[in-house]
Amino acid sequence: MQTVDDIDKLPDELLEHIKQARRVAVLTGAGVSAESGIPTFRDAQTGLWARHDPMSLASPEGFARDPALVWSWYAWRRELISRARPNPGHFALADMAGCFEQFTLITQNVDGFHQLAGSDPVLELHGNIHRTICSVAGRPIDHEWLTRHADSQPPPSPHHADGLARPDVVWFGESLNASTLEAAFKAAAGCELMIVAGTAGAVQPAASLPAIARDQGATVIDINPMVGEITRLADWHLSGTSAAWLPAIYNDLLSAPSSTERHP
Ligand code: BV8
Protein backbone atom coordinates (compact mmCIF):
# COMPACT_ATOMS: atom_id res chain seq x y z
CA MET A 1 0.00 0.00 0.00
CA GLN A 2 1.34 3.44 -0.94
CA THR A 3 0.28 6.52 1.03
CA VAL A 4 -0.17 9.83 -0.79
CA ASP A 5 -0.62 13.02 1.21
CA ASP A 6 0.22 15.69 -1.36
CA ILE A 7 -3.22 16.70 -2.62
CA ASP A 8 -1.66 18.69 -5.48
CA LYS A 9 0.12 15.78 -7.07
CA LEU A 10 -1.48 12.41 -7.68
CA PRO A 11 1.32 9.96 -8.60
CA ASP A 12 1.39 9.34 -12.37
CA GLU A 13 1.01 5.59 -11.83
CA LEU A 14 -2.18 6.12 -9.83
CA LEU A 15 -3.55 8.69 -12.25
CA GLU A 16 -2.97 6.24 -15.09
CA HIS A 17 -4.92 3.53 -13.24
CA ILE A 18 -7.83 5.95 -12.78
CA LYS A 19 -7.74 7.22 -16.37
CA GLN A 20 -7.62 3.72 -17.85
CA ALA A 21 -10.44 2.33 -15.70
CA ARG A 22 -13.64 1.54 -17.59
CA ARG A 23 -15.63 0.04 -14.71
CA VAL A 24 -15.47 1.88 -11.39
CA ALA A 25 -17.16 1.15 -8.07
CA VAL A 26 -17.25 3.59 -5.16
CA LEU A 27 -18.03 2.76 -1.52
CA THR A 28 -18.71 5.65 0.84
CA GLY A 29 -19.21 5.87 4.59
CA ALA A 30 -20.00 8.47 7.21
CA GLY A 31 -16.68 10.28 6.65
CA VAL A 32 -17.93 11.58 3.28
CA SER A 33 -20.65 13.54 5.11
CA ALA A 34 -18.38 14.69 7.95
CA GLU A 35 -17.54 17.93 6.15
CA SER A 36 -21.23 18.62 5.77
CA GLY A 37 -21.35 18.77 9.55
CA ILE A 38 -22.90 15.34 10.08
CA PRO A 39 -21.17 13.48 12.96
CA THR A 40 -19.75 10.15 11.80
CA PHE A 41 -21.51 7.15 13.21
CA ARG A 42 -18.95 6.42 15.88
CA ASP A 43 -18.18 10.04 16.70
CA ALA A 44 -19.25 10.84 20.21
CA GLN A 45 -22.79 11.94 19.45
CA THR A 46 -23.05 15.54 20.54
CA GLY A 47 -25.29 16.89 23.27
CA LEU A 48 -28.29 14.84 24.30
CA TRP A 49 -27.00 11.69 22.64
CA ALA A 50 -23.52 11.65 24.15
CA ARG A 51 -24.64 9.10 26.78
CA HIS A 52 -26.20 6.66 24.31
CA ASP A 53 -24.40 4.03 22.25
CA PRO A 54 -25.48 4.49 18.61
CA MET A 55 -24.99 0.76 18.08
CA SER A 56 -27.77 0.01 20.57
CA LEU A 57 -30.06 2.76 19.29
CA ALA A 58 -29.70 1.52 15.69
CA SER A 59 -31.11 -1.93 16.49
CA PRO A 60 -34.52 -3.67 16.66
CA GLU A 61 -33.83 -4.42 20.32
CA GLY A 62 -33.18 -0.75 21.05
CA PHE A 63 -36.40 0.23 19.27
CA ALA A 64 -38.42 -2.44 21.08
CA ARG A 65 -36.92 -1.34 24.40
CA ASP A 66 -37.60 2.38 23.95
CA PRO A 67 -39.33 3.34 20.68
CA ALA A 68 -39.72 6.97 21.75
CA LEU A 69 -35.96 7.34 22.42
CA VAL A 70 -34.98 5.75 19.10
CA TRP A 71 -37.61 7.76 17.21
CA SER A 72 -36.29 10.98 18.82
CA TRP A 73 -32.68 10.06 17.95
CA TYR A 74 -33.61 9.70 14.31
CA ALA A 75 -35.69 12.93 14.43
CA TRP A 76 -32.59 14.70 15.80
CA ARG A 77 -30.42 13.27 13.01
CA ARG A 78 -33.02 14.12 10.32
CA GLU A 79 -33.12 17.70 11.63
CA LEU A 80 -29.30 17.90 11.55
CA ILE A 81 -29.25 16.56 7.99
CA SER A 82 -32.04 18.89 6.83
CA ARG A 83 -29.96 21.89 7.96
CA ALA A 84 -26.83 20.61 6.21
CA ARG A 85 -25.86 20.41 2.52
CA PRO A 86 -23.75 18.04 0.43
CA ASN A 87 -20.06 18.98 0.31
CA PRO A 88 -17.53 19.09 -2.58
CA GLY A 89 -16.83 15.38 -2.11
CA HIS A 90 -20.45 14.48 -2.86
CA PHE A 91 -20.51 16.78 -5.91
CA ALA A 92 -17.21 15.43 -7.26
CA LEU A 93 -18.59 11.88 -7.18
CA ALA A 94 -21.72 13.01 -9.04
CA ASP A 95 -19.55 14.79 -11.64
CA MET A 96 -16.98 12.05 -12.18
CA ALA A 97 -19.57 9.34 -12.91
CA GLY A 98 -19.68 10.52 -16.55
CA CYS A 99 -15.92 9.94 -16.96
CA PHE A 100 -16.28 6.16 -16.96
CA GLU A 101 -18.15 3.54 -18.93
CA GLN A 102 -19.57 2.02 -15.75
CA PHE A 103 -19.78 3.87 -12.43
CA THR A 104 -21.53 2.31 -9.42
CA LEU A 105 -21.93 4.41 -6.29
CA ILE A 106 -22.51 2.33 -3.17
CA THR A 107 -23.09 4.07 0.15
CA GLN A 108 -23.46 3.04 3.77
CA ASN A 109 -24.84 6.49 4.55
CA VAL A 110 -28.54 7.11 5.10
CA ASP A 111 -28.51 10.92 4.68
CA GLY A 112 -29.43 11.06 0.97
CA PHE A 113 -26.65 13.57 0.27
CA HIS A 114 -25.31 11.68 -2.76
CA GLN A 115 -28.70 11.98 -4.46
CA LEU A 116 -28.98 15.63 -3.39
CA ALA A 117 -25.58 16.27 -5.04
CA GLY A 118 -26.84 14.72 -8.29
CA SER A 119 -25.69 11.09 -8.10
CA ASP A 120 -28.20 8.70 -9.63
CA PRO A 121 -28.55 5.77 -9.11
CA VAL A 122 -27.18 5.27 -5.60
CA LEU A 123 -27.03 1.86 -3.95
CA GLU A 124 -28.09 2.67 -0.37
CA LEU A 125 -26.93 -0.43 1.50
CA HIS A 126 -28.34 0.77 4.81
CA GLY A 127 -31.49 2.55 3.67
CA ASN A 128 -32.49 6.19 3.91
CA ILE A 129 -33.36 8.19 7.04
CA HIS A 130 -35.89 10.29 5.11
CA ARG A 131 -38.14 7.29 4.44
CA THR A 132 -40.42 5.84 7.15
CA ILE A 133 -41.96 2.35 7.27
CA CYS A 134 -44.25 0.28 9.47
CA SER A 135 -42.26 -1.63 12.12
CA VAL A 136 -44.39 -4.76 11.54
CA ALA A 137 -45.48 -4.72 7.89
CA GLY A 138 -42.40 -2.91 6.51
CA ARG A 139 -44.67 -0.86 4.23
CA PRO A 140 -43.97 2.84 3.56
CA ILE A 141 -45.66 5.49 5.72
CA ASP A 142 -46.13 8.90 4.11
CA HIS A 143 -45.27 12.28 5.59
CA GLU A 144 -48.91 13.39 5.62
CA TRP A 145 -49.78 10.53 8.03
CA LEU A 146 -46.74 11.25 10.19
CA THR A 147 -47.64 14.92 10.41
CA ARG A 148 -51.23 14.07 11.34
CA HIS A 149 -50.01 11.75 14.13
CA ALA A 150 -47.02 13.80 15.28
CA ASP A 151 -48.42 13.93 18.82
CA SER A 152 -47.36 10.28 19.27
CA GLN A 153 -43.62 9.58 19.46
CA PRO A 154 -43.28 7.41 17.41
CA PRO A 155 -46.54 7.73 15.46
CA PRO A 156 -48.64 4.56 15.10
CA SER A 157 -48.62 2.70 11.80
CA PRO A 158 -51.55 2.86 9.33
CA HIS A 159 -50.66 -0.65 8.13
CA HIS A 160 -50.79 -2.79 11.26
CA ALA A 161 -52.53 -2.50 14.63
CA ASP A 162 -49.30 -3.40 16.48
CA GLY A 163 -47.06 -1.43 14.12
CA LEU A 164 -45.18 1.78 14.84
CA ALA A 165 -43.48 4.24 12.49
CA ARG A 166 -39.74 3.54 12.19
CA PRO A 167 -37.03 4.87 9.90
CA ASP A 168 -36.44 2.89 6.68
CA VAL A 169 -32.84 2.10 7.62
CA VAL A 170 -31.09 -1.26 8.17
CA TRP A 171 -30.42 -1.75 11.88
CA PHE A 172 -27.67 -3.92 13.35
CA GLY A 173 -28.91 -7.49 13.26
CA GLU A 174 -31.21 -6.79 10.29
CA SER A 175 -30.55 -8.09 6.81
CA LEU A 176 -29.79 -5.73 3.95
CA ASN A 177 -32.09 -5.50 0.93
CA ALA A 178 -31.10 -8.54 -1.13
CA SER A 179 -31.19 -6.92 -4.57
CA THR A 180 -29.25 -3.84 -3.41
CA LEU A 181 -26.60 -6.03 -1.81
CA GLU A 182 -26.42 -8.26 -4.90
CA ALA A 183 -25.87 -5.21 -7.11
CA ALA A 184 -23.11 -4.01 -4.78
CA PHE A 185 -21.38 -7.40 -4.79
CA LYS A 186 -21.65 -7.52 -8.60
CA ALA A 187 -20.09 -4.06 -8.92
CA ALA A 188 -17.23 -5.00 -6.58
CA ALA A 189 -16.64 -8.26 -8.44
CA GLY A 190 -16.61 -6.58 -11.86
CA CYS A 191 -14.79 -3.31 -11.33
CA GLU A 192 -11.24 -2.44 -12.37
CA LEU A 193 -11.04 0.35 -9.78
CA MET A 194 -12.71 0.72 -6.38
CA ILE A 195 -12.60 4.07 -4.60
CA VAL A 196 -13.42 3.76 -0.89
CA ALA A 197 -14.06 7.06 0.88
CA GLY A 198 -14.88 7.92 4.47
CA THR A 199 -15.41 4.54 6.00
CA ALA A 200 -13.76 2.74 8.90
CA GLY A 201 -14.65 -0.57 7.25
CA ALA A 202 -16.06 -1.87 10.52
CA VAL A 203 -19.55 -2.90 9.47
CA GLN A 204 -20.40 -6.04 7.52
CA PRO A 205 -21.30 -6.98 4.86
CA ALA A 206 -20.43 -3.52 3.39
CA ALA A 207 -16.85 -3.80 4.62
CA SER A 208 -16.28 -6.95 2.55
CA LEU A 209 -16.76 -5.11 -0.77
CA PRO A 210 -13.20 -3.70 -1.06
CA ALA A 211 -11.69 -7.15 -0.45
CA ILE A 212 -13.93 -8.62 -3.17
CA ALA A 213 -12.66 -5.94 -5.56
CA ARG A 214 -9.02 -6.46 -4.60
CA ASP A 215 -9.28 -10.26 -4.84
CA GLN A 216 -10.42 -10.06 -8.47
CA GLY A 217 -7.59 -7.73 -9.40
CA ALA A 218 -9.09 -4.26 -9.06
CA THR A 219 -7.02 -1.33 -7.86
CA VAL A 220 -8.37 -0.19 -4.48
CA ILE A 221 -7.99 3.40 -3.30
CA ASP A 222 -8.77 4.33 0.33
CA ILE A 223 -9.56 8.00 1.00
CA ASN A 224 -9.42 8.66 4.72
CA PRO A 225 -7.50 11.00 7.06
CA MET A 226 -6.87 7.95 9.26
CA VAL A 227 -5.54 4.43 8.71
CA GLY A 228 -8.29 1.83 9.13
CA GLU A 229 -9.41 -1.65 8.10
CA ILE A 230 -9.67 -0.68 4.45
CA THR A 231 -6.25 0.97 4.31
CA ARG A 232 -4.57 -2.31 5.13
CA LEU A 233 -5.93 -3.99 1.98
CA ALA A 234 -5.84 -0.95 -0.33
CA ASP A 235 -3.24 -0.35 -3.05
CA TRP A 236 -3.29 3.40 -2.38
CA HIS A 237 -4.15 5.42 0.72
CA LEU A 238 -4.97 9.05 -0.05
CA SER A 239 -4.43 10.48 3.40
CA GLY A 240 -6.87 13.31 3.91
CA THR A 241 -10.51 14.28 3.60
CA SER A 242 -12.90 13.17 0.89
CA ALA A 243 -14.02 16.78 0.33
CA ALA A 244 -10.43 17.53 -0.72
CA TRP A 245 -9.35 14.32 -2.48
CA LEU A 246 -12.46 13.57 -4.56
CA PRO A 247 -12.49 16.99 -6.31
CA ALA A 248 -8.71 16.62 -6.85
CA ILE A 249 -9.25 13.29 -8.59
CA TYR A 250 -12.07 14.72 -10.71
CA ASN A 251 -9.95 17.74 -11.72
CA ASP A 252 -7.13 15.41 -12.83
CA LEU A 253 -9.65 13.38 -14.82
CA LEU A 254 -10.86 16.55 -16.53
CA SER A 255 -7.33 17.11 -17.80
CA ALA A 256 -7.50 13.60 -19.33
CA PRO A 257 -9.10 12.90 -22.77
CA SER A 258 -12.83 12.05 -22.66
CA SER A 259 -13.83 8.44 -22.01
CA THR A 260 -14.67 7.87 -25.72
CA GLU A 261 -11.28 9.29 -26.76
CA ARG A 262 -9.63 7.13 -24.09
CA HIS A 263 -11.53 4.00 -25.07
CA PRO A 264 -12.20 4.13 -28.84
C1 BV8 B 1 -26.41 -8.15 8.45
C2 BV8 B 1 -28.01 2.40 9.36
C3 BV8 B 1 -27.25 -10.39 8.45
C4 BV8 B 1 -28.61 2.79 10.68
C5 BV8 B 1 -26.01 1.08 9.87
C6 BV8 B 1 -19.80 -10.45 10.02
C7 BV8 B 1 -18.78 -10.27 10.95
C8 BV8 B 1 -19.00 -9.52 12.11
C9 BV8 B 1 -20.25 -8.93 12.34
C10 BV8 B 1 -21.23 -9.12 11.44
C11 BV8 B 1 -21.02 -9.87 10.28
N1 BV8 B 1 -22.19 -9.86 9.56
C12 BV8 B 1 -23.11 -9.16 10.25
C13 BV8 B 1 -22.56 -8.69 11.39
C14 BV8 B 1 -23.23 -7.90 12.40
C15 BV8 B 1 -23.24 -6.42 12.02
C16 BV8 B 1 -21.86 -5.83 12.06
O1 BV8 B 1 -21.23 -5.62 11.04
N2 BV8 B 1 -21.39 -5.52 13.25
C17 BV8 B 1 -20.08 -4.90 13.36
C18 BV8 B 1 -20.20 -3.63 14.16
C19 BV8 B 1 -19.14 -5.90 13.96
N3 BV8 B 1 -23.83 -6.23 10.73
C20 BV8 B 1 -25.17 -6.22 10.60
O2 BV8 B 1 -25.91 -6.42 11.53
C21 BV8 B 1 -25.72 -5.96 9.22
N4 BV8 B 1 -26.73 -6.93 8.93
O3 BV8 B 1 -25.32 -8.47 8.14
O4 BV8 B 1 -27.51 -9.02 8.43
C22 BV8 B 1 -26.63 -10.73 9.80
C23 BV8 B 1 -27.12 -10.16 10.98
C24 BV8 B 1 -26.54 -10.50 12.21
C25 BV8 B 1 -25.46 -11.39 12.26
C26 BV8 B 1 -24.97 -11.93 11.07
C27 BV8 B 1 -25.55 -11.60 9.85
C28 BV8 B 1 -26.39 -4.60 9.16
C29 BV8 B 1 -25.39 -3.50 9.39
C30 BV8 B 1 -26.04 -2.14 9.10
C31 BV8 B 1 -26.16 -1.32 10.37
N5 BV8 B 1 -26.72 0.00 10.05
N6 BV8 B 1 -26.56 2.26 9.49
C32 BV8 B 1 -28.27 4.21 11.09
O5 BV8 B 1 -27.47 4.88 10.39
O6 BV8 B 1 -28.81 4.64 12.10
S1 BV8 B 1 -24.36 0.99 10.09
C33 BV8 B 1 -23.75 2.54 10.31
O7 BV8 B 1 -22.50 2.36 10.91
C34 BV8 B 1 -23.46 3.27 9.02
O8 BV8 B 1 -24.43 3.07 8.04
C35 BV8 B 1 -22.12 2.73 8.61
O9 BV8 B 1 -22.25 1.57 7.84
C36 BV8 B 1 -21.54 2.35 9.93
C37 BV8 B 1 -20.52 3.37 10.33
O10 BV8 B 1 -19.43 3.06 9.60
P1 BV8 B 1 -18.67 4.21 8.79
O11 BV8 B 1 -19.55 4.73 7.73
O12 BV8 B 1 -17.36 3.66 8.42
O13 BV8 B 1 -18.52 5.39 9.84
P2 BV8 B 1 -17.52 5.43 11.07
O14 BV8 B 1 -17.98 6.53 11.93
O15 BV8 B 1 -17.35 4.07 11.64
O16 BV8 B 1 -16.14 5.84 10.40
C38 BV8 B 1 -16.04 7.06 9.71
C39 BV8 B 1 -14.76 7.00 8.91
O17 BV8 B 1 -14.63 8.22 8.19
C40 BV8 B 1 -13.53 6.87 9.79
O18 BV8 B 1 -12.64 5.92 9.21
C41 BV8 B 1 -12.91 8.26 9.74
O19 BV8 B 1 -11.50 8.22 9.82
C42 BV8 B 1 -13.33 8.72 8.36
N7 BV8 B 1 -13.44 10.18 8.20
C43 BV8 B 1 -13.73 11.11 9.15
N8 BV8 B 1 -13.77 12.33 8.57
C44 BV8 B 1 -13.51 12.15 7.24
C45 BV8 B 1 -13.30 10.78 7.01
N9 BV8 B 1 -13.04 10.28 5.79
C46 BV8 B 1 -12.95 11.15 4.78
N10 BV8 B 1 -13.13 12.49 4.90
C47 BV8 B 1 -13.42 13.02 6.13
N11 BV8 B 1 -13.59 14.34 6.26
Image: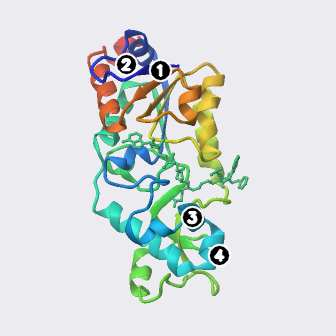
- Between marks 4 and 1, how big is the CA–CA gap? 43 Å
**Element type at mark 3:** loop
- Establish if 76 lies above or below 254: below
**Element type at mark 1:** loop
In the rendered structure, find residue 163 and report the number of the disc placed on it: none
Q: Three-letter amino acid code at disc 3? A: Ala
Whether residue 254 sits left or right of residue 147 in the image: it is left
In the rendered structure, find residue 259 and report the number of the disc placed on it: 2
Q: State which quarter of the image contains the C terminus.
A: top left
Q: Is residue 120 visible?
A: no
- Between marks 4 and 2, how big is the CA–CA gap? 47 Å
10 Å crowding of disc 4: few (<14), some (14-19), many (20+):
some
- Between marks 3 and 2, how big is the CA–CA gap? 41 Å
Q: Residue at x 46, y 25 (%)?
A: 237
Q: Residue at x 55, y 64 (%)?
A: 53
- Residue where numbered disc 3 is placed: 58
Q: Three-letter amino acid code at disc 2? A: Ser
Q: Three-letter amino acid code at disc 1? A: Arg
- Is ligand 1 within 8 Å of the beta carbon of the residue shown at mark 3? yes
In the rendered structure, find residue 136 and report the number of the disc placed on it: 4
